[in-house]
Amino acid sequence: QLSEYVPHRFHPCGPGKGQRLVLSRMFQPQNLREDQVLSLDGKSDSLTCKSQRLMLQVGLVLPASPGCYHLLPYTVRAMEKLVQVIDQEMQAIGGQKVNMPTLGPAELWRASSRWDLMGKELLRLRDRHGKEYCLGPTHEEVITALVASQKKLSYKQLPFLLYQVTRKFRDEPRPRFGLLRGREFYMKDMYTFDSSPETAQQTYCLVCDAYCRLFDRLGLRFIKAQADVGSIGGNMSHEFQLPVDIGEDRLAICPSCNFSANMEILDLSQTNCPACQGPLTETKGIEVGHTFYLGTKYSSIFNAQFTNAHGKPSLAEMGCYGLGVTRILAAAIEVLSTEDCVRWPSLLAPYQVCLIPPKKGSKEAETSELSGHLYDHITEAVPHLHGEVVLDDRTHLSIGNRLKDANKLGYPFVIIVGKRALEDPAHFEVWCQNTGEVVFLTKEGVLELL
Ligand code: ATP
Ligand code: MG
Ligand code: MG
Ligand code: MG
């Protein structure tokens, strides 16, 4: 009986044997109409783009206050998967994960002058003793002070590649586009410390390559564009941009030599490519990552030193590298989805498979048993699908309605266990989201496909 399924609580290793994840028990607002979504978000920001509308409609996020969202269970799963891929890429190049406090002491920010330079974007507060802090919008000051506190660093220990994935706070003048521009969002920020400008440049290239691999693995077409170094200084900076019309950045692209740059750079008012003189074209993009070579800008302020090969103190050469974690989720949905249906990078889909048994009625016991068997079979026989299969047990709804919901949520595979599957072993109807195919398979065929 479907009603006998054990309620599932999210657990890192998925449901235990005999437990099945059922949709009716999920905290998942579904099927909101466009006007309901509008009234939901009416108090914060109005609907500004497709990903924001879809994420609200299918119950991925709910607005909390302007620029702040509740991330609901499906989104948290997708984000955890994204963080896992980020961890793999950062650790493959030697990254070490840390976690720094959100409260940044004002004196660190005054030392770099950014307490004033950041203006109203910096969210400030005082503790009970009157001491001033900001809610970290980024962590160059904090991490440089942390590394500077280690007085006995040797050049032999460098480079250090330290990173974290944490919430960041920026009082954006115009929070909009849902998770794309929030006032509270997740960022992966890495900071690197090298013993010479030459090795720092190598580290810079290493991190950029890791970013390229990350976006390739997610199946997202990106542009690596030269970027303005702005107030950060240094002489090298690149943005990783997803080309899409609602993007807020304007990029100049050279189709002949692949040069690309953010048009914020001033000398780019020209219409010809600075590299090959060919004509430039323009496209819009969403900035999903940003890399900077910082030199000694921060290490000189906080005295982040190490002992060099000659036994003398020397300032660390630094780089900083941001990835907008929540922005990547929304941007991926923005570029991959249709107007009505969410589409994910396959690696990030919150659940890989949705099983749909028939509507309540005759042969109910038999079909629920059959779908239960298939559920157990898939999760046991395919190790990477353990915890990745949901059963849409809302059998008061027709198969068609539930199939529509599943399509909207973007499970890579939807399997309908209809009554015909009782007689015909080759009648599991499988919808493959990524290829758009519908195939009829046996149980073994299903396993093979997955
Ligand atoms: P933008 O130009 O879009 O305001 P930024 O240049 O101010 O972004 P960085 O300081 O480079 O942002 O931060 C690193 C990354 O953090 C960005 O590349 C972006 O992916 C992400 N990010 C920045 N601001 C936000 C925000 N308000 N909401 C969500 N993600 C953000
Ligand atoms: Mg900004
Ligand atoms: Mg920018
Ligand atoms: Mg930036």
Image: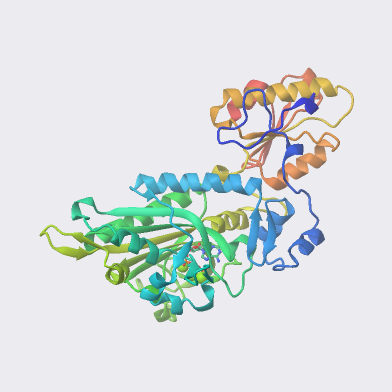
Locate the N terminus and report the quarter of the image it occupies. Answer: top right
Q: Residue at x 52, y 55 (%)?
A: 325
In this figure, what is the number of numbered marks? 0
Above or below, 120 against 283 in this view is below
Displayed quadrant of residue 25: top right
Q: Residue at x 60, y 47 (%)?
A: 76
Going by the image, does 45 lie left or right of 245?
Answer: right
Q: How is the image coloured?
A: rainbow
Above or below, 154 against 436 in this view is below
Going by the image, does 278 lie left or right of 435?
Answer: left
Which residue is nearer to you in this view: 430 or 399? 399
Displayed quadrant of residue 61: bottom right
Q: Residue at x 58, y 58 (%)?
A: 331
- Percent across and percent down for residue 292 are 37, 65
- Percent across and percent down for residue 121 are 53, 74
- Percent across and percent down for residue 411 are 66, 41
Q: Is residue 65 visible?
A: yes
Which residue is nearer to you in this view: 320 or 299? 299
Displayed quadrant of residue 237: bottom left
Going by the image, does 113 lie left or right of 41?
Answer: left
Residue positioned most to the right? 362
Residue positioned most to the left? 310
Q: Residue at x 74, y 27 (%)?
A: 5
Locate the C terminus and report the quarter of the image it occupies. Answer: top right
Which residue is nearer to you in this view: 387 or 241? 387
Q: Is residue 229 visible?
A: no
- Percent across and percent down for residue 175 are 62, 69
Which residue is nearer to you in this view: 174 or 415? 174
